[in-house]
Image (cartoon, rainbow, N blue to C red):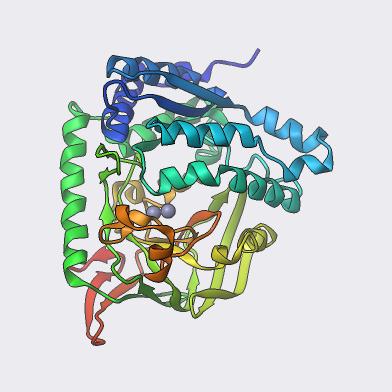
Amino acid sequence: MQADYSKMIDPLKLDSLAKVAVKVGLGLEKGQDLVLTAPIVALPFVRRIVAEAYKAGAGVITPIFSDEELTIARFHHASDMSFDRAADWLYEGMAKAYTNGAARLAVSSNNPLLLAGEDPARVARLNKATSIAYQPALEKISGFHINWNIVSYPAPAWASLVFPDLSIVEATRALAEAIFAASRVDNDDPIAAWADHNRQLKKRSTWLNDQRFSAMHFSGPGTDLTIGLADDHEWQSGASIARNGITCNPNIPTEEVFTTPHAYRVEGYVRSTKPLSHQGTLIDGISVRFEKGRVVETYAAKGEAVLNELLDTDEGARRLGEVALVPDSSPISASRLLFYNTLFDENAACHIAFGQCYSKCFRDGVSLNAEEIASRGGNRSFVHVDWMIGSDSIDIDGIRADGSRVFVFRKGEWAI
Ligand code: ZN
Ligand code: ZN
């Protein structure tokens, strides 16, 4: 029998987080169905979410659970051919649910090192098989056909990595409090706090959109990178209006303002500033060089094999699908915690993503088809992997089409 670490988590704040996930994160509509994916360890949280969602008028809620020990069992006991396969029928069903209007909620609480001891080639094969099977469902999500949300739950294995000096019990409690603070549920009126936060982020994205920069230039230790922006790109932040007309906050927490780079106009080199937890393995000390948008040189102090497998997923995996600005003073960054979870770490630092772009990061993006997005420079890939390049020593200039420059960030903070 395993200890029940969920008892360490403040039940009122967990209720509040469930409410924020349903009301702010999803904006779930009366009668709308919901597909909910979660690790089984998050069951106490899932029960709260489901109750909130039915109270909000949900139609049918379908929970789909995973379990890390079952994943490990596959790596230890499955035949080799298992690693090139995925449950296609399940992902097809998800895509069908989204086509029929269901919302999507994912609870994240992964052990960042779950697969660190496994064969990187097998990890990559399984990721690839899953990504391919998941593509039709992912298109509905990344294309914002539906309202969706990712929110986190403090699992013990994750907590002890973030707080290595604490006991599992204390670490779980500490991670819970860190998640609550970052998700803005540690105050009297979280819904109002989110409305205010969304307004502040919107000011930044509106300013950037008014500038019509053609490129952003990042400079700092180990970094001299010019990221051309896609034609007709649009900066986005916080709340999004999905194609179904529903306003959702896809990431909880969120501190970023982000847009689409041009897949063929990225030049120079860049160094990571935080480790990247990727599908149960850790990649750290990344340094890459781009030519005409493509990664042509790669180095990682840790996890280089996994990084190379990731970049070899398809042609688009070597190009950028996102650039995002986050000041070093963001609350998550100010906590000085390393979460080993991209949902948090990407909101503590400027970041870029290898792979698929977001169609909504274009003017009138929701009405563009895949060819129109590609013709504007939008990247296409089976993967979308964010990694952190921001710090308190990064400077960013916006470059206009006539070559003139505007200070956007100085020493990791907004200069405007
Ligand atoms: Zn991002
Ligand atoms: Zn991203």
Pick whichever, 289 or 6, lies toward us.
Answer: 289
Q: Residue at x 30, y 49 (%)?
A: 255
Q: Position of residue 384 (x, y in %)?
A: 50, 54
On screen, 278 above or below 379? Answer: above
Q: Position of residue 312 (x, y in %)?
A: 65, 63
Q: Position of residue 387 (x, y in %)?
A: 48, 58
- For the view shown, which residue lies furthest in the top direction? 1
Looking at the image, residue 238 sits to the left or right of residue 122; the answer is left
- Which quarter of the figure is the N terminus placed in? top right
Q: Residue at x 49, y 64 (%)?
A: 272
- Residue 397 visible: yes
Looking at the image, residue 173 sits to the left or right of residue 25; the answer is right
Give the tally of numbered discs.
Answer: 0
Pick whichever, 192 or 266, lies toward us.
Answer: 266
Quadrant where ligand 1 appears: bottom left
- Residue 338 visible: no
Q: Position of residue 278 (x, y in %)?
A: 57, 50
Q: Residue at x 56, y 43 (%)?
A: 134
- Which quarter of the figure is the C terminus placed in? bottom left
Q: Quadrant of residue 81?
A: top right
